[in-house]
Image: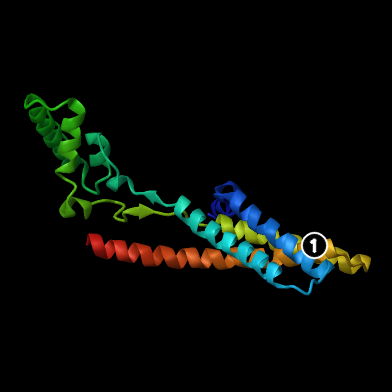
Amino acid sequence: MRSTLLRKIFSLGELRYGWLLAISVAVCVVAFYVDEQWNPREQLWLSLFYFASFLLAVLWGGANYVGHIRVNAMYRKQHDIAAYVNQLAISAEDKTELRNYLEDYAADLERQGRTKEEAKREAVSQFKVKEFLSMSKHTRPFESHGHHYLIGYAAIALAAAAAAALIEVLTDSFSLPGLIATTLLTVYGICFIGLFALYKLVDKFLYKKLQDYFS
């Protein structure tokens, strides 16, 4: 159980649209560097850079979430009678009876002029109604990722920030790149944790609304 959780947490490849997040970080680094190095009197452009970085991060957060949503198999187009029946939470005997019925129904449709694929699709669609959807093992119309990888990114970012800060303390040195790295790693690490919590809240809200709609 623990190893499974750790594998989910450090499945770093699950992050989507990383290039968008990278641009957000790069813009923030440039703004931070200019702000600290030259401290220009005109702060409007710096504010715009910081806002652009924030906006890109928000866009990435939305795109990343949507990228992990998958349509539940029950709500996808089904052409395979056996695959459809196997998803229903009914006994093996009932599955066999239903499968035979649907196959007979599809055969009748073929005799009426439907193609084999059309017949299967229509036979399955006849049973995609509320009574049979309620028997599904997975009643949610959408499946979303567990988002555990965000905790992994947060852990790595915060650990790197702590290491950078510790090095500066031990070496009694200070550098602007070190300050930027420590600050941004800390901020983005905390934001990853916040995003994880936000994703979970959105999951619950979205699923509740969809469950109410389909119930």
Q: Nearer the viewer, residue 28 or 102?
A: 28
Q: In screen coordinates, is 67 left or right of 13?
A: left
Query: Does the rendering let one see residue 159?
Result: no
Q: Kindly state the secondary structure of the residue where label 1 is placed.
A: helix
Percent position of residue 165, x then y: 81, 67
Percent position of residue 166, x then y: 83, 66
Q: Amino acid at mark 1?
A: Ala
Q: Report the number of discs.
A: 1
Few, some or many residues within 10 Å of mark 1 (<14, 14–19, 20+) = few
Which residue is painted at 83% across and 68% down in the image? 38
Query: Does the rendering let one see residue 42?
Result: yes
Which residue is painted at 37% across and 63% down in the image? 206
> Which residue bears the numbered disc 1?
163
Q: In screen coordinates, is 117 left or right of 205?
A: left
Which residue is painted at 50% across and 54% down in the image? 63
Which residue is painted at 18% across and 50% down in the image? 132
Q: Is residue 158 above or below residue 100?
A: below
Percent position of residue 77, x then y: 27, 40
Percent position of residue 183, x then y: 74, 67
Tell me the quarter of the image containing the C terminus. Answer: bottom left
Quadrant housing residue 176: bottom right
Q: Nearer the viewer, residue 113 or 88?
A: 113
Q: Is residue 17 above or below residue 112?
A: below
